[in-house]
Amino acid sequence: MQDQTTKIEQFVKSIHYHHSKDIHNKEHSSYFFKTTHYTLLLTRFFALKNDALDGITTPYIISDAIILKYNRKENRYEIMEKGHESIQESIDQELAKSEKLVMQYIEEVDQLEDELYMRKLSPIFLDVWFDLKKDITRIERILERVYETLKLYTKYHETLESFPHEGFINIIEHIKRYQRLAALNSNKLDTLYNYYNSLKSDKMNNNIYALTILSGIFLPLNLIVGFFGMNTEGLYFSGNPNGTFHVVLILLSLFFVFVALIPIISIIERLILRRLLGRFNLYNKLVSNIKNISLFNNK
């Protein structure tokens, strides 16, 4: 045990100062660097820490005589007894945790999508969307970097017989698959954001439309009230004891006429313009395209 500790200490002393800083830097991204005496491999994955996405960087120092892993929690170097196979097992464990986290994020995106398409607009939609977008974009970036790093690491050791090629190829394929999933869900979030803005715009347009309708109803009524409120001689119903009743009756009649016209116009638009004409034009186009395809195939 004493000889092993001495061996580790001697090897650590030979590590370049700048590389030692990279090893102790817990925020360092994935990285692969070659020297004449050793190679430095840094792999960065992620986990949840304090309700936030946190990156985890694991350094490996590789030489012909010894392979070390820096244990960041215990602040010490450990010998990888099985060499590159031990590195593969360590990366496999980190990747498995990251894959589960990616799937949890995907489930959150799917839930947000379902709620939005069912028009369940949450008041904190933008806050949830921003947190998901930020974390998934970061996941995509981390996976892309570790993917490129492991490709370089695998290519550098491809001539080594004891190197577990199949194991690392499998790891690289898994990383690329989940990187694509992260990119896909990042694009899905962009689509949800655009759809959310469309719903908000539609809601605002409907509010403006309602205000316009109310203005259209009450503007003629205000005009009539203003007309009969003029202090001029010979005004209609000015000498009639039932004049007020007649004016109120006129106002109510006009009000109900205007209110009744709105749903009638809406029904006409929906039944005739949208359903009949819109569907008629749509199916005409489809039938025409199908006929053109059939004629082309017959030729």
Image (cartoon, grey):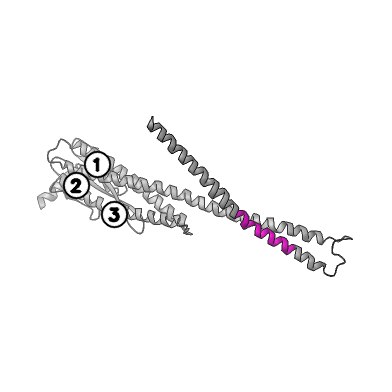
Identify the main secondary structure in magenta: helix
**Residue drawn at (33%, 47%) of the image:** 181
**Residue 225 shown left or right of residue 109 in the figure:** right
Secondary structure found at label 2: helix
**Sequence-first disc among 3 and 2:** 2
> What quarter of the picture does the C terminus occupy?
top left
Location of residue 208 (image quadrant): bottom right
**Sequence-first disc among 1 and 3:** 3
Q: Nearer the viewer, residue 94 or 122?
A: 122
Query: According to the image, label 1 marks what residue?
Result: 150
Q: Would you place residue 54 above or below residue 284 in this image? A: below
Secondary structure found at label 1: helix
Q: Amino acid at mark 2?
A: Gln
Q: Position of residue 225 (x, y in %)?
A: 77, 61
Residue that protrudes farthest toward the front in the picture: 298
**Sequence-first disc among 1 and 2:** 2
Magenta region? 251-266
Task: Select label 3 or label 2 by which is in front.
Answer: 3
Q: Amino acid at mark 1?
A: Leu
- Decide: few, some or many residues near mark 2? Use Cα within 10 Å; few <14, some 14-19, many ≥20: some
Regarding residue 21, the answer to whether it shows in the image is: no
Image mark for residue 88: 2
Residue that protrudes farthest toward the bottom in the picture: 241
Query: According to the image, label 3 marks what residue?
Result: 100
Location of residue 53 (image quadrant): bottom left
